[in-house]
Image (tube, helix red, strand yellow):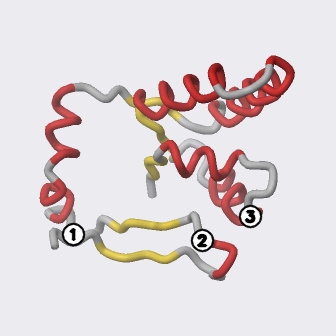
Amino acid sequence: MKYMLDTNMVIFAMQKDDPRQVRQKITSHNGDMFISSITYDELMYGVYNSYSEKRKQTKIIMLNEFLTRVSILPFDEKAADHSANIREFARVPSLLVEDWSNVKTQKTSRKRPLSSN
């Protein structure tokens, strides 16, 4: 299964006190993890504009290490047209939305089909 991570999930996974399960899940799917070029831009902007010089260097190293595990996909006009139409996703019968952000309270990630409601 392939996973597209958003900016919030990447930040959550990189936090010092993140749940181990999130990092293990990302590591176990090495090669099947993706971020969009927009997510990459948001991450780089955050690192370069939010920290002191010393902390910035640490965050750059962490981000670069994380980026070795994901592929960066382009986000062009065609992708924007499709992602803006949430009903388009509902056409894919096996598409699941997984919320990895609350693994502290769950033994497994919550999976639910994507609906058009």
Would you call the spot at circle 3 few (<14 residues within 10 Å), some (14-19), or many (20 or more)? some
Alpha-carbon span between mark 2 and mark 3: 9 Å
Decide: marks 1, 3 in contact (CB < 8 A)? no
The N terminus: image quadrant: bottom left
Q: Which residue corresponds to the image point at 74% horizontal and 58% vertical from the top-left?
A: 18
Mark 2 secondary-structure assignment:
loop
Q: Amino acid at mark 3?
A: Pro
Q: Identify the residue position indicated by label 3 in the image.
A: 19
Q: Mark 2 or 3 closer to N-term?
A: 3
Whole-percent x, y for residue 102 in the image:
59, 71
Q: Identify the residue position indicated by label 2 in the image.
A: 102
Q: Identify the residue position indicated by label 1 in the image.
A: 93
Would you call the spot at circle 2 few (<14 residues within 10 Å), some (14-19), or many (20 or more)? few
Does residue 8 appear left or right of residue 53 in this picture? Answer: left
Q: Which residue corresponds to the image point at 47% horizontal and 38% vertical from the top-left?
A: 35
Q: Which residue corresponds to the image point at 66% horizontal and 56% vertical from the top-left?
A: 28
Whole-percent x, y for residue 6 in the image:
46, 46
Q: Mark 2 or 1 closer to N-term?
A: 1
Q: In which image quadrant can residue 101 be found?
A: bottom right
Alpha-carbon span between mark 1 and mark 3: 30 Å
Q: Amino acid at mark 2?
A: Asn
Q: Amino acid at mark 1?
A: Pro
Does residue 81 appear left or right of residue 98 in this picture? Answer: left
Whole-percent x, y for residue 92 in the image:
20, 62
**Near-viewer residue (2 or 103):** 103
Mark 3 secondary-structure assignment:
loop
Whole-percent x, y for residue 114 in the image:
27, 69
Q: Is label 2 or label 1 in front?
A: 2
Mark 1 secondary-structure assignment:
loop
Does residue 106 appear left or right of residue 40 in this picture? Answer: right
* Count of numbered circles on the image: 3
Q: Is residue 46 above or below residue 16?
A: above
